[in-house]
Image (cartoon, grey):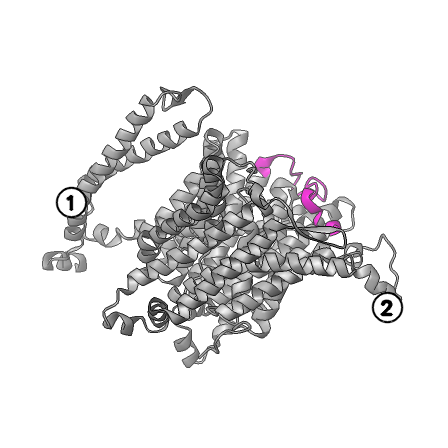
């Protein structure tokens, strides 16, 4: 890609972020966008660690949480006039703390990648989450600690009373963080991180210390996780133990993986999808975590490269102009798949509901008799049967689309 | 003092043996596939819930027999249709898969059984004190737990080391290709070991359910500790897992039973701090308070200073 093409993508990204509140300006929408902004930075920093550096972490929330806690403490200090700076720099405080924590923990956790690293990260995560409940004066125990973002010198007259103002601040930080994380992938350190992920032995043979490369990546990831934590502190003005425990670490792993590891855009997709599921789906169903778990397992099983990987699979087909030949096969398999998902969700919800009358997709079901269960089950099984029957034609279409004949080769070259 | 010590030792032993029942399966599965099964404790939870449901209709003893079998079959299915499929994408994908499975099982348990604590009771038959020491009673059910665990371990040890099938399994762990060339169905052996490992976790769940309460978070509570044990003991080492299980069980039990803490230490050293010192939480720490984090502290220390664990093999 040329430089112009690339900068167009970045400008579109920034404009898109800035324009979002113009289309959706409800209070709920703004709060969702703020969550999304935080999730994007956090997931990108996780991808830096796992996708780029090959370090599977079960304790990445530690850097997010510690950054967030110190950011809230900084807010409190601004309130009591111990410190005096505009709150726009709060994410940097978080990032700095995340970096400090990573600088320390990385000295002993980055010896090895793989299982050893995963285990140390798990141990550290549990250790710090458990300690945060013990050291009440700093972490505030179960209730957490809270601050107030409206103190401190105003920034060009803005005093941060509204979430929308915070959104634009978050956009600025998200854009800067994304840009810098992208630049990191272009630096020699970023390239070496990939090399060490794929083959640490060879990287050592050409004279790089695999451990040092991992350490640098680890610290950078800690820094950006801390920035996300600082954004969290600004948005919610409080933080609790929940934000640095294993559940938060797990969620960021989920979002990065579902989006697609290894692709820069993957975690962004994952963060957006997960935040939307979290905030929209949870209004309709208290089972959304179950759906999330199922979706995650299906992704691991069938789309090991995530949503982004699925999109990228079509790059070749697109380049050869054969994408049209896939539309019909996709529809043939896609329609029953869609029905399968809808009907399965209906079945799960119907068997979970406490009410006798159950509304789903505008239809009224009766959960007290067996007849509706049987009807939906038939729909599920029929859809499953159609999917199975339609798979061979999809596979054949996919293979023929990927077959590069000589004519196509010439066409692509010219 | 002595009575506290004796009861802490007995309780530590119960916990330790319970932990080993989980850890043994986990470490066997690790040496077989090279992947730590994050969902192992979830199978333990499933064991407790299945046994609870069965015990409602057929009593505790039927649950003790059938719940582990159901869990074992489920585990074998997971290996056959899940793990084997993910295996081609590498170890990270496998680890992530088992992590997702643990997540899903917790949600599924809440879906089928609800989020509340289940009233899963130990059998009336064992509802008497086994013996009374210093006026304190030791429940027979805990004695029964010790007995069952030790019986299972001895029989498992004999099967693994003396029987023909055990020898084939041991060979398959280290030399899968050779064993396959000799005409044994290695994938089937793997599936079987995975099934038996999860069934063992199921047994642990059936027995622990009445003591440690049956609720959707029980897998998380024990899961990470079992991980710690397997790593401290040395990945893939059964003997190491045994020592580490007992060690962690006793350590936690002693820490909870003791009433020592930083104030005592400071008293001995003759140092005094004011109550409103910013680090006051640190000066008033007590051992029972830090009992939950001791295993993780130990894990981090072991990984830093002896990454192969207590009995782990030296790395190449």
Query: Which of the two residues, A336 or B121, is positioned nearer the viewer here?
Result: B121
**Magenta residue check for A159:** yes
Tell me residue A123's x, y (percent).
Answer: 57, 60
Mark 1 — residue?
Answer: A393
Magenta span contains residue A124 = no
Side of A143 where A374 appears, left or right: left
* Nearer to us in this view, B261 or A244: B261
Residue visible at 42% across and 73% down in the picture: A200
Q: Secondary structure at mark 1?
A: helix
The verdict on a common chain for dots 2 and 1 is no
Q: Let me know if residue A397 appears in the view.
A: yes
Q: Nearer the viewer, residue A13 or A104?
A: A104
What is the spatial separation of the Cα atoms under label 2 and label 1, in whole angstroms?
79 Å
- Seen at 59% across and 65% down, the residue is B299
- Horizontally, residue B33 falls left or right of residue A212, namely left
Q: Is residue B149 above or below residue A334?
A: below
The dot on residue B269 is: 2
Q: Residue A101 at x, y = what percent?
A: 62, 61
In this rendering, the answer to whether B56 lies above or below A87 is above
Q: Quadrant of residue A97?
A: bottom right
Where, by quadrant of the figure, is residue B164 drawn? bottom left
Question: Is the N terminus of chain A in the top left, top right, bottom left or bottom right quadrant?
Answer: bottom left
Residue A54 as seen in the image, left or right of residue A219: left
- Residue A141, numbered circle: none
- Image vertical order of residue B39 relative to residue A276, above or below: below
Q: Position of residue A406 (x, y in %)?
A: 10, 60
Mark 2: which secondary structure? helix
Magenta stretch: give its range.
Answer: A136-165
Which tag is nearer the camera, tag 2 or tag 1? 2
Tell which subunit mark 1 falls on: A
């Amino acid at each position: 890609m040329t430089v112009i093409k690339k900068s167009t993508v970045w400008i579109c990204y920034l404009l898109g972020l800035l324009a979002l509140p113009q289309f959706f300006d409800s209070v709920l929408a703004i709060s969702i966008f703020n969550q999304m902004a935080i999730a994007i930075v956090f997931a990108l920093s996780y991808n830096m660690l796992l996708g780029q550096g090959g370090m599977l972490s079960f304790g990445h929330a530690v850097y997010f949480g510690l950054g967030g806690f110190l950011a809230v403490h900084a807010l409190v200090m601004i309130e009591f006039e111990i410190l005096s700076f505009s709150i726009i720099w709060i994410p940097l405080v978080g990032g700095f703390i995340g970096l400090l924590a990573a600088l320390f923990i990385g000295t002993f956790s980055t010896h090895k990648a793989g299982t050893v690293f995963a285990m140390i990260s798990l141990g550290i995560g549990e250790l710090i989450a458990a300690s945060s409940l013990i050291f009440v004066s700093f972490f505030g125990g179960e209730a957490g600690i809270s601050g107030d973002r409206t103190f401190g010198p105003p920034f060009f007259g803005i005093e941060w009373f509204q979430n929308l103002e915070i959104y634009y601040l978050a956009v600025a930080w998200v854009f800067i963080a994304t840009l810098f994380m992208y630049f990191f992938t272009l630096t020699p350190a970023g390239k070496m991180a990939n090399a060490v992920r794929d083959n640490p032995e060879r990287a050592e043979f050409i004279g790089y210390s695999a451990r040092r490369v991992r350490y640098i990546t680890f610290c950078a990831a800690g820094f950006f996780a801390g920035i996300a934590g600082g954004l969290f502190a600004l948005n919610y003005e409080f933080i609790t133990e929940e934000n640095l425990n294993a559940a938060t670490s797990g969620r960021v792993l989920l979002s990065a993986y579902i989006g697609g590891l290894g692709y820069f855009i993957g975690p962004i997709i994952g963060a957006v999808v997960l935040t939307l599921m979290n905030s929209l789906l949870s209004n309709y169903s208290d089972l959304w975590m179950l759906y999330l778990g199922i979706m995650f397992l299906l992704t691991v099983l069938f789309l090991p490269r995530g949503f982004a990987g699925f999109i990228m699979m079509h790059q070749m087909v697109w380049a050869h102009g054969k994408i049209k030949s896939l539309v019909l096969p996709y529809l043939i398999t896609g329609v029953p798949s869609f029905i399968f998902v809808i009907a399965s969700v209906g079945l799960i919800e119907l068997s979970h509901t406490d009410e006798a009358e159950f509304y789903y997709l505008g239809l009224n079901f009766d959960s007290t008799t067996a007849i509706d269960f049987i009807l939906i089950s038939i729909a599920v099984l029929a859809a499953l049967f159609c999917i199975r029957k339609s798979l061979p034609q999809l596979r054949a279409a996919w293979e023929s689309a990927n077959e590069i004949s000589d004519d196509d080769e010439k066409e692509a070259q010219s | 003092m002595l009575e506290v010590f004796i009861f802490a030792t007995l309780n530590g032993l119960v916990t330790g043996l319970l932990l080993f029942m989980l850890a043994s399966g986990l470490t066997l599965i690790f040496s077989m596939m090279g992947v730590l099964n994050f969902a192992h404790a979830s199978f333990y939870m499933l064991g407790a819930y299945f046994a609870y449901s069965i015990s409602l209709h057929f009593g505790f003893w039927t649950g003790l027999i059938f719940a582990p079998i159901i869990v074992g079959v489920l585990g074998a299915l997971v290996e056959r249709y899940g793990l084997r499929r993910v295996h081609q994408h590498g170890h990270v994908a496998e680890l992530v898969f088992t992590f997702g499975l643990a997540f899903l099982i917790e949600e599924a348990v809440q879906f089928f059984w609800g989020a509340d604590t289940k009233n899963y009771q130990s059998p009336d038959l064992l509802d008497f004190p086994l013996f009374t020491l210093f006026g304190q009673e030791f429940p027979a059910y805990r004695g029964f737990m010790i007995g069952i665990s030790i019986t299972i371990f001895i029989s498992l040890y004999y099967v693994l080391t003396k029987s023909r099938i055990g020898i084939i399994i041991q060979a398959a762990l280290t030399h899968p290709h050779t064993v396959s060339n000799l005409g044994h169905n290695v994938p089937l052996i793997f599936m079987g070991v995975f099934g038996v490992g999860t069934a063992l976790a199921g047994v642990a769940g059936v027995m622990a359910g009445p003591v440690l309460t049956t609720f959707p978070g029980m897998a998380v509570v024990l899961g990470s500790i079992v991980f710690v044990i397997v790593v401290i003991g040395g990945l893939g080492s059964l003997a190491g897992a045994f020592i580490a299980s007992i060690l962690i069980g006793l350590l936690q039990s002693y820490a909870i039973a003791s009433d020592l803490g930083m104030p005592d230490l400071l008293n001995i050293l003759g140092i005094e701090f004011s109550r409103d010192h910013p680090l006051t939480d640190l000066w008033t720490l007590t051992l029972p308070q830090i009992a939950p984090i001791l295993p993780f502290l130990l894990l981090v220390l072991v990984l830093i200073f002896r990454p192969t664990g207590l009995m782990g093999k030296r790395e190449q």
